[in-house]
Amino acid sequence: MSSELPSRYRADRWYSPQNLWRKISRYAVVAGRKTVVSAITLYHCLRDKDTPRWAKGVIVGALGYLILPTDLVPDIIPGAGYGDDWAALVAALGTVAAYVKDEHKIRAAVQTEKIFGLKGH
């Protein structure tokens, strides 16, 4: 289904580790802790060799949507801009929950605290 969309609208076109970290480093405070920790948890699950291919596809789609510059609710809208991104991340987490390990969650929590500590919040 997503292959029917022009490539500029496909979330998987936008995902790369560099694009994810760039987005998080620039917009963490605006996006909020829940969005950041969810994205980083999925990132670690994606990198795990035990995560099946289909689950990695779900994760890439959700992370790509977070990075996508034009999504359902523009990210620049205060208070609402990252709501749809967070919903996509939560849906992905629910879908691949069986493959999310405690180590993914712990690493994400530690990295999130470092990010928000550096941002002064």
Image (cartoon, rainbow, N blue to C red):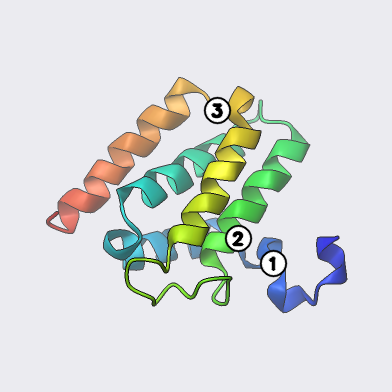
As drawn, 25 above or below 96:
below
The reply to whether callout 2 and callout 3 are in contact (CB within 8 Å) is: no
Which residue corresponds to mark 3?
100
Residue 47 at least partly seen: no
Question: Which callout, 2 or 3, points at the residue further toward the start of the chain?
Answer: 2
Q: Residue at x 72, y 68 (%)?
A: 10
- Where residue 9 appears, as percent x and y from the top left, is 70, 74
Rendered image quadrant of residue 38? top left
Position of the C terminus, as image quadrant, is bottom left
- Where residue 77 appears, as percent x and y from the top left, is 38, 76
Rendered image quadrant of residue 22? bottom left
Position of the N terminus, as image quadrant, is bottom right
Which residue corresponds to mark 1?
13
Q: Amino acid at mark 2?
A: Gly
Kind of element beneath mark 3: loop
Residue sitting nearer the eye, 91 or 40:
91
The outermost residue toward the left is 120
Find residue 64 and name its label. Answer: 2
Kind of element beneath mark 2: helix
The reply to whether callout 1 and callout 2 are in contact (CB within 8 Å) is: yes
Label 3, label 1: how many angstroms apart (C-alpha)? Answer: 24 Å
Question: Which callout, 3 or 1, points at the residue further toward the start of the chain?
Answer: 1
As drawn, 68 above or below 37:
below
- Where residue 27 appears, as percent x and y from the top left, is 34, 66
Q: Residue at x 59, y 43 (%)?
A: 91
